[in-house]
Structures are given as C-alpha cells and as structure tokens.
Image: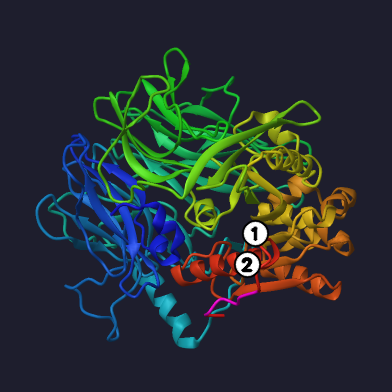
Amino acid sequence: MTGTAADFADLSAFAALPRLSSLALSPDGTRLVTVVAGLSPDGKTWQGSLWEVDPSGRRPARRLTRSAKGDSHPVFTPDGALLFLSARPDQEAKPANGKPKDKTALWLLPPAGEARELYRPSGGVGRFAVAREAGTVLLVADAHPTAEFGEPDEALRKAREDAGVTGILHESYPIRYWDADLGPTYPRQLVTTGPVDADSDRLDPAAGLVDLTPGADGHVGSQSAISPDGRWVVHVERVPVSAAYGSRVRLRLRGADGGVDRVLADREGYSYSEPVFLPDSSGIVAIESFDSTSDSPWRCELVRIDLESGEVTELTPDFPEEPEHPVVSPTGDAVYFTSSLRGHQPVWRLDLSSGEVVRLTASGAYTDVLVSPDGATLYALRAAVDHPPQPVRLDAAAAEQEPVRLPAPGAVESLPGTLTEVETTAEDGRAVRAWLVLPDGCSAERPAPLLLWVHGGPVMSWNSWSWRWNPWLMAARGYAVLLPDPALSLGYGRDFVRAGWGSWGAKPYTDLMAITDVTERRDDIDESRTAAMGGSFGGYMANWIATRTDRFKAIVTHASLWNLDAFTGTTDDSYYWLREMGDPLTQQDRVLANSPHLRVADIKTPMLVIHGDKDYRVPVGEGQRLYFDLVRHGVPAKFLYFPTENHWILTPGNAKLWYETIFAFLAEHVLGEPWQRPDLL
C-alpha cells in the first residue's frame, strides 16, 4: 500500500493511494491508532477505517474496522476501549420507517470483541472527547434551541419534516459556514453522567446525559475540552460586539454536573480557541488571539488560565510566529505546539517552569501530536511538500531531530521529480522564498515549462502535502511547479504578514513576480512557456496577475475572489474580511485599490475559471461574474462548474475531472497542443 512515481502519472492510481489522518494513543502507550481513507468499491467516495500502528515500529500496521460509511475520530477510554464516530447502520437496532438512520453515531470497539453503537442522536454526533482519568465523555450534538435535547428535539424535527418546512429564521450572524447552512439546530455540549468503558451499553439520553447548554442558539461553539477528572468542561462562546466589529470568542466554564456556569476568559479585542486542560485539572492552556483590524493582522499567543481565579498568563510572549494546536504533557511540565516556519511546520516544546521554547523537529509539517504517558515520547503525523502524512515517533526533548517513521499504509517510495528551494530579496529587503518542484529529466538541454501556483489563505504557507492541490501530478506531466510564500504568508514573522495586510494587490503581487523572475533565470526552466494558477486567495492572485501582466500563457483560477465589494457582504464570515479590507461604505479606497474586477479590460491572457456551487466561503457568484466579465471583454475563457462541490473539490470523480481539465487547458495554451475536451465533459 505504498505509492510510486508512476501513480502520479495516472489520476485513478493517485486517487487510490491511502490517505492518513488523526491519531489516538492508548492510556498505557502501547497502542497507536490512525484513520486510513481509501477509495470506496464504486470509486465515488473515500472511506475511512481505523488501523492500529505499532508505536515501537516493529510490527506492521493492522486494520481494525470496515464500514461502507467510513469510521473516524478515534479516542481511547481509560480502560483501553476505542471510541470512534461512524454513520454505519446499527445491525442490532430496528430500522426507522423501514430505513436505518444515517446520522453519525458514537461507537465503541472493546480491546476484544466487535464494535457496537453507543449513541446516535437525531442530529448525529459532531465531535467528542474523553476525560483521561474519569472516563466520562463530552459530546457535541445539534438540537433546536426551543426544544429539550432528546425526544422533544426529535419530535420537532419530525414535525418540520412532515409539514415540508425547510425555512430557517436567523436572528444573529453568521448564517452559514464553508458549505453548511447554520440552523435551525445548533451545537450543544453534553456530558455522560458516568464513565464509558469496554463494558458500556447504549447511552440513555434521558438519564445518561447532562445538557450543559440548553437553548443554545448559535453562540455556543463546538470547540471544547473536558478535564481529566471529569468535573469541568470549557467551551468557546461567541459574543456579539457591535455592528461594525462583529463578535469575539470567549471561554466559558461549566461544571460537568450542570452546577457551575461562568465566563472563564473574556478580553475586549481578543478571542480564544483550542482549550486543553492541565493534567491536574486546575487550569487550561489555550490560544489567545488578538482580533484583526484594518491596520493590523491577527496574532496568537499561548496562554495559561487558572480555573479558580481566571488569571491569564502569557506563555509565549517572545515567540515570533503563530502557535497552534497545544498539547499538554501528562506529566504537566511542558506544552507542545506547532507553528509554520519557512516552509515547514515544526513541533515546539515549551517548558512550563523556565519558559524556554525549543524546536524539536528539523523538517516537515506535523499534526496530531500526542505525548506518551511518561512524557518521554511524542507521536505525530508527519507530512512534507514531498511526502503525505505518516505516523512517526519523536524524542520529547531532543532539538531539531528527524523522526522515526512507523510502518503504516500510505507511504510514497518515489516521486516524478525532485524538490528544491528558490529565494530572492524584495525591494523592501524581505527575503521571499519558494519550493520548486522539478520534473524528472529537466535540464539545460531540456528546460521544463513553469507553473506558478499561489497558495490560498491568504495567511498560510506551502509547508505540507496536499491531496487536493498536488504539484507532483503536474511534475508527472513535465511541468516545473513554483510554490511561493509571498507577503501575507505564515512562517516568516509577523511583519511579513503585515507587509500584505489590506493590500493584496501590492507586495503579494510584486513578491510573486520577483520569485518568478529568479526561477525563470534558471537554465532548466523554459521562461517562454509559463502559466499561473491558484485557489481561493491564490485564485484572487491569479485574477490580479491577469490584470497586471500578460507574461503568462494561461491562468487557472479556482474558487476565486473577483469583486471584493460583493464578496465581502456574501461570504460566510463577512466581519473578518471587513476588519482587513475595511467597510466599503467608509473605506472604499482600499476596496477599489485591490479589486481585480475593476481592471477586467486589461486582461489578455486565456483563463480557466473553476467554481463549486456549494462554496459559501467564496460564493459562486464570484466565479459567475468573473466568467461573464471575461466573455464580454473578449478574453478566451472557459468555466468549469461543479453543482455539488464546495470550496474544495472533494469527490474522486470530480477531483479527477478538475485535474484533467486543467491539464488540457495548459496543454493547449502553454504546450501549443490542440484543445482536447475531457471525456466526461
């Protein structure tokens, strides 16, 4: 189950490669479980299954579950049972109205025996967590704000269905998120009244669950944590501020028995996220974020918050990057976190006694960090631009180490090219760098055509593997691929983000052109055959590039921003963009200076526009307006439209068509080949 260079020349073979996500470590540290997604038998979806990986690296991985609906989110209970989420049908339950319920349920796989369903609420389980010592379970599930959780909520759902009602009345903002409409049900935080273990039977919602957030109407978020002793729950809560500002996010403390309910952390101009408890349950570690303004980007700090006093202590005041995903050691002496850094995403160790921060990994991008019970070993998924996620083992204290890779599906043995780096200096003295993928066989005698690929975000970085936007598929077809981090990118200090804040068309653009200039001067690159592409913010930059230069033979723009004024009011999180670009009613100059739609008459380059109808982050109207503007100005253009996809193209068939159409478009305009319409279009 490993990949080779040949798999990147065949889109069907690429789609069949195993894809890993999530990690869970047993309480005794002897079992490591990951999710491996593979193609379904009909090839129309990817299905997750649970696999056990040997933490010592001696035994091969073994598959634990099989389900046509897929399994995800493994978490161990204190006695070593494995909880997970799945929409698989319960073979022991009577079908409802002749059909099994298809909502996501909480399942339990004991150390010995078969998996069984524990709980399937009407709206499904959104996420869950387990108290490390007590074994009680925190569940997040949706319910109507006007109904009690359980049977009353089920009755209201059925009444709406029987009446043919789908309408939603909104009395607060936001109203949708990514590809999902919000309401009429909203997340609730629920805790089991006792521990869940290998012998547990089905949960009784009437007697076995405590609803900590009755009547939640959208202000309660799904991010939450339960203390190791099972006594406390901390969750995020949205707080409206003003019509101009939107809202901020605070932390709320709840007693697991429902007896305590108070604000834990709330600071004007700041928001909180990713709470995790200290091992003695006396406090939490969380991310405190300064909310962005039109003059300043957001910035993050790690903080410790005392449960009793609410005192907030900054833990990383001098750390120059943006910490995320904190994990507290079971021994209570350290916090581990990740952060972007110059095309990588290292693991960092913060010593809670001294405040010292040490970089633990030399290269790669790490997620799902776990700490062994004795605090001496870390486990994580490691990926890189040139390798998909794989489970690894790390020394919990050694600086800038290379990890021990653990046997698991999904490794890639060879690629159709090599990876190097390019760097230049911007006019203001900033160093601008990029990854450069070079196809096999390119040389001064056989220079490769170049594809400039701009990342999304915009506050992101090319620092890891991407299944959706994979440069190695381009390399397999002979293209060199430039993956730059222009102004606004993470991993280069906060001033680097500030350099492009609120002025996307300025330094981000000149950075991209400067790094492209340097790359084109290489003797193994054919500067006469170049193209540009990007998605989301990268799509915005592709559009902006089209208005500023005709140096590229073709431009591909996916899920892209075109009319900033219209986009700001129709995206799913308008206030965030207002705080950067400014209110068009009061700061019209900034919007006008950066909106590519005002410069459509300057576009001469052939463009391929791609958009999904279910995209709420960049609504499909942006793509429709862009395509129409191109057509009416006589620009050679095509529009690839996906009625069932969102901001990303997530189904195997459509992902294959996405690449096939791009390959054909580039072949026509960059390689000079005749246009060949993909077979299934």
Q: Which residues are magenta?
A: 675-679
Task: Check residue 677 for magenta coloring.
Answer: yes
Is the image coloured rainbow, by chain, by secondary structure, or in one colour? rainbow
The image quarter in which residue 43 lies:
bottom left
Q: Are marks 2 and 1 in contact (CB under 8 Å)?
A: yes
Q: What kind of residue is marked 2?
A: His
Residue where numbered disc 2 is placed? 170
Q: Can residue 320 be seen in this snapshot?
A: yes
Q: Within 10 Å of the Cα at label 1, are there few (<14), some (14-19), or many (20+) other Cα atoms?
A: some
Residue with the most extreme top position: 354
Residue that lies at the very extreme toward the front in this rendered image? 445
Observer-nearest of 455 and 416: 416
Question: For the residue carrying disc 2, how many other residues have a C-alpha within 10 Å: few (<14), some (14-19), or many (20+)?
Answer: few
Above or below, 301 against 260 in this view is above
294 vs 264, nearest the viewer: 294
Which residue is the site of mark 1? 173
Q: Which of the two residues, 476 or 492, is positioned nearer the viewer here?
A: 476
Indicate the position of residue 561 as horizontal and vertical percent values: 72, 59
Judging from the image, what secondary structure is the residue with disc 1 in? loop
**Which residue occupies the foreground of this view, 351 or 36?**
36
Q: Which residue is rendered at x = 10% and y = 57% of the image?
A: 113
Question: Residue 111's x, y, as percent?
Answer: 13, 49
Magenta segment includes 341: no
Give, as a three-letter code, the residue at label 1.
Tyr
